[in-house]
Image (spheres, rainbow, N blue to C red):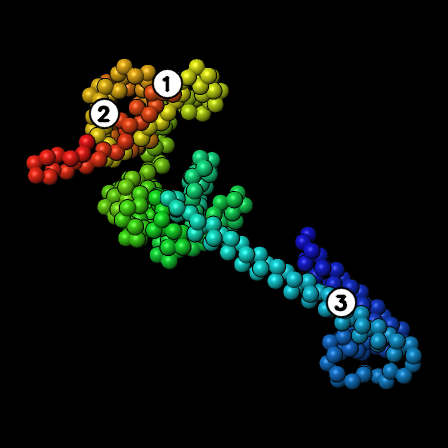
């Protein structure tokens, strides 16, 4: 129990005791019950209607003085508890909101997670685990309270509201994840975010496959269909359980990574950027299995599917993630192959660029 609440309970109990003792005292002096209760009430609250009966004896005067002092003291003590609770609560909320605002203002190249339902909470947990900065937006105070208790930066409001996205730093954000449960709301979030920042990457959730085209048409860079991905994942676990479990173990088992690191090998995930020269080419065409010491273990496609031990005819698509096993010294050369290709320019017949 908090200190203000404990003070309220204690004050209320003392007030009740004072009233009962005072009523009993007046009844003991020969007063009726209703007269005694009435006398106690007008005495404590200082209404000033006058005594029900003359207060002539020293005992009644002492009792009345005690009622005034004890009653007022209990009331003031109880009201003080209420005031402390209100002031502390408002002050904490104000300070918390200010700290949250300052934290969001410092963010740059961060992710804005719109919606803190089950999918949004999982996404936030993974971003936090990876050390990626983000701010979460939701209308549900209970969800935001849970997120805030985990140390996340949160913002209460409607993610479709331009003012809320502005507070979340949409102009400085690198990614917007619209993971709300309703497709229509995700469409509005996508439209608003794209209008406010033309360069931000928007990843939207869609429950209905028919919504995918609408989201892409509204400006989403990628659309994730959790239901479809879940079904594909289950199908892979049924049809290719060994391959799927192997790729998962490669990603999750820290012991395996540590053992490989001791002999100079490591697993790396390299993304095929939309402007990369590798996009649209096969592994054979780019000679990914060349003389350098690395091996393509698998390709995690942008739609969530996995291609383990791909062949030379496997085509790389934008936003695919290639999982490779390589020597430490070979990683820089390998990474350069996945960098975004610089645009070519022709000036007076001379081609400049890559």
User: In percent of the image, x 31 and y 45: which residue is there?
Assistant: 200
Q: Which residue is mark 3?
A: 74
Q: Is residue 182 visible?
A: no
Q: State which tag comes first along the sequence, 1 or 3.
A: 3
Q: Are marks 1 and 3 in contact (CB under 8 Å)?
A: no
Where, by quadrant of the figure, is residue 65 drawn? bottom right
Closer to us: 28 or 148: 148
SS at mark 1? strand
Q: Residues within 10 Å of mark 3 (few under 14, many from 20)?
A: many
- Badge nearest the viewer, 1 or 3: 1
Closer to us: 146 or 202: 202
Q: Are marks 2 and 1 in contact (CB under 8 Å)?
A: no
SS at mark 3? helix
Q: Pinpoint residue 145: horizontal percent, then vertical percent.
A: 52, 49
- Badge nearest the viewer, 3 or 2: 2
In the picture shown, does residue 151 fall above or below 126? below
User: In percent of the image, x 36 and y 37: which residue is there?
Assistant: 226
Q: Pinpoint residue 123: horizontal percent, then vertical percent.
A: 42, 39
Q: Which residue is mark 2?
A: 315
Q: CA distance from mark 2 to mark 1?
A: 24 Å
Closer to us: 344 or 197: 344
* The C terminus, quarter of image: top left
Q: Are marks 3 and 2 in contact (CB under 8 Å)?
A: no
Q: Which residue is mark 1?
A: 327
SS at mark 2? loop
């Amino acid at each position: 129990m908090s200190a203000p609440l404990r003070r309220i309970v204690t004050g209320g109990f003392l007030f009740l005791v004072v009233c009962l003792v005072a009523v009993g005292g007046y009844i003991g002096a020969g007063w009726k019950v209703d007269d005694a209760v009435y006398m106690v009430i007008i005495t404590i609250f200082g209404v000033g209607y006058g005594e029900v009966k003359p207060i002539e004896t020293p005992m009644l005067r002492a009792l009345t003085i005690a009622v005034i002092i004890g009653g007022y003291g209990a009331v003031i003590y109880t009201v003080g508890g209420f005031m402390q609770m209100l002031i502390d609560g408002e002050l904490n909320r104000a300070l918390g909101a200010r700290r949250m605002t300052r934290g969001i203002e410092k963010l740059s190249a961060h992710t804005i997670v719109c919606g803190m339902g089950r999918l949004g909470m999982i996404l936030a947990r993974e971003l936090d685990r990876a050390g990626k900065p983000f701010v979460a937006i939701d209308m549900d105070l209970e969800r935001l309270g849970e997120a805030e208790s985990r140390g996340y930066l949160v913002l209460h409001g409607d993610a479709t509201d331009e003012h809320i996205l502005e507070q979340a730093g949409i102009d400085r954000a690198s990614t917007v994840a619209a993971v709300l449960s309703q497709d229509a709301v995700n469409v509005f979030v996508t439209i608003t975010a794209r209008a406010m920042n033309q360069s931000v990457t928007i990843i939207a959730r869609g429950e209905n496959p028919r919504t995918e085209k609408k989201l892409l048409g509204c400006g989403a860079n990628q659309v994730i269909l959790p239901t479809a991905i879940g079904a594909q994942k289950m199908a892979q676990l049924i049809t290719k359980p060994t391959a799927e479990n192997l790729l998962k173990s490669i990603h999750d088992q820290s012991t395996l990574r540590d053992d490989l690191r001791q002999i100079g090998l490591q697993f790396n995930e390299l993304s095929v950027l939309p402007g990369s020269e590798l996009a649209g080419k096969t592994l054979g065409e780019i000679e990914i299995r060349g003389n350098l010491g690395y091996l393509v273990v698998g390709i995690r496609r942008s739609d969530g599917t996995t291609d383990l031990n791909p062949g030379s005819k496997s085509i790389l698509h934008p936003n695919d993630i290639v999982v490779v096993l390589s020597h430490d010294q070979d990683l820089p050369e390998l990474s350069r192959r996945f960098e975004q290709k610089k645009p070519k320019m022709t000036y007076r017949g001379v081609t400049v660029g890559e």
